[in-house]
Amino acid sequence: MTQTYEDFSKYGKEFADTGLKSFASLTKGAQAIATEAGEYTKKSFEAGSAAVEKLFSAKSIEKAIEIQTDYAKQSYESFVAEASKIGNLYAELAKEAYKPFESVVAKAK
């Protein structure tokens, strides 16, 4: 009976430690994602402001359409690249958060 209690206690402590390690990984990953999203927002806002300034200085409708087209193309390319980067950060976050549980799962098998 005491052996069962000791085993249960040991596994409970191990699971709690693993949970804390996983939580630390989640926190670090979420922080990286938030930083990346903040930087992208700042860059996007600056690019939009620059495009508006160019639009106001355009001398013809054709030039304004060209500026708008270039801005739309750059914005789309920037968004796709950023979405890919953030997707990779989420994948890395999931891997890092699961890593502490690998040993627990292996022992359970």
Image (cartoon, grey):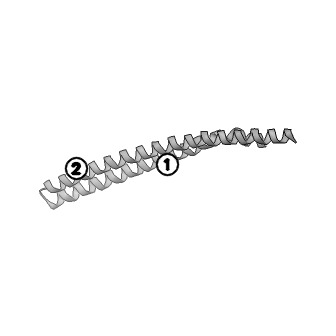
Residue 72 - label = none
Q: Is the C-beta separation of discs 1 and 2 under 8 Å? A: no
The C terminus is located in which quarter?
A: top right
Percent position (x, y) of residue 71?
Answer: 28, 53
Does 2 sit left or right of 82 as displayed?
Answer: right
Can you name the residue that lies furthest to the front here?
A: 2
Q: Earlier in the sequence, mark 1 or mark 2?
A: 2
Percent position (x, y) of residue 25?
Answer: 55, 40
Can you name the residue that lies furthest to the right here?
A: 1
Percent position (x, y) of residue 82?
Answer: 41, 48
- Residue position for label 1: 87
Can you name the residue that lies furthest to the left here?
A: 59
Residue at image point 49% right, 45% down: 30
The N terminus is located in which quarter?
A: top right
Does 15 sit left or right of 61 as displayed?
Answer: right
- Say few, some or many: other residues with alpha carbon within 10 Å of mark 1 (under 14 / 14 to 19 / 20 or more): few
Relative height, residue 21 to residue 67 (above, below):
above
Relative height, residue 4 to residue 45 (above, below):
above
Residue at image point 37% right, 47% down: 38
Three-letter amino acid code at disc 1? Answer: Gly
Does 19 sit left or right of 27 as displayed?
Answer: right
Q: Circle 1 — which element? A: helix
Q: Nearer the viewer, residue 35 or 76?
A: 35
Residue at image point 70% right, 39% down: 13
Q: Nearer the viewer, residue 14 or 32?
A: 14
Q: CA distance from mark 1 to mark 2?
A: 28 Å
Residue 11 lies in quadrant = top right
- Say few, some or many: other residues with alpha carbon within 10 Å of mark 2 (under 14 / 14 to 19 / 20 or more): few
Residue 59 lies in quadrant = bottom left
- Residue position for label 2: 50
Three-letter amino acid code at disc 2? Answer: Ala
